[in-house]
Amino acid sequence: MSRSNRERTEQTRQALIDAGRCLFVEKGYAETSTPEIVAAAGVTRGALYHHFEDKKALFRAVIECEAQGVTEAIEERSASHDAPRAALIAGTSAYFDAMRVQGRTRLLLIEAPAVLGPSAAATIDAENAEATLRTGLAAMLPEAGAMLGPLTSLLSAAFDRAAIAIEAGDGRRDYEQAIAALLDGLTDHLQR
């Protein structure tokens, strides 16, 4: 495939992802039809099915892009900190900022588990934001040992619940302070 064909193919795929995202945020997965998606993307129905097996496969691609966006924001912000705790606190702030993107909380935390299933949604998270959390916790809590996995899962769930609460209007600062207190409590507990 020539370079220009590859570029056109990628542009078509991205147009479908962008159109799908917009409609999934606006209407929800169940209420979004494939004809609406192709019309919004400005492509044919055949182009949709060339790139994605079905609407669910397109939705999964949207979710993967959203999850990668959150991860990139966390990694970018936390990379400038050498101390593991400071990196985790910066990552916390980056996570909450990233989740403020219109529709992202709904897509990642409500629609994805409902449409893809809890296991598939958890796998996408485990490969993205949860992986960065695990790395940060491993650096901050080297003595965690076998508890690293469960601690990562529990804190990841706490982050997700906080994002939903913040989206609903609760105070972000309170949740950032609570996460910091949890991290400090873990450090104190594991260093005893």
Image (cartoon, helix red, strand yellow):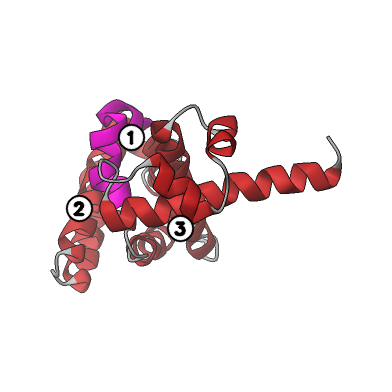
The amino acid sitting under disc 2 is Gly
**Image quarter of residue 90:** bottom left
- In this rendering, the answer to whether 16 lies above or below 102 is above
Q: Which mark is residue 185?
A: 2
Mark earlier in primary sequence (2, 1): 1
**Residue shown at 59% from the left, 31% from the top:** 50
The amino acid sitting under disc 1 is Ala
Residue 87, percent across and down?
A: 44, 60
Asked if disc 3 and disc 2 are in contact, CB closer than 8 Å, the reply is no
- In this rendering, the answer to whether 41 lies above or below 52 is below
Residue 95, percent across and down?
A: 36, 59
Give the residue at mark 1: 121
**Residue shown at 86% from the left, 40% from the top:** 2
Secondary structure beneath dot 1 equals: helix
Give the residue at mark 3: 74
**Residue shown at 30% from the left, 58% from the top:** 26
For the magenta stretch, what is the residue range?
106-123
Is there any visible trace of residue 118 in the rendered image? yes
Q: Residue furthest right?
A: 2
Towards the viewer: 133 or 15:
15
Towards the viewer: 43 or 189:
43
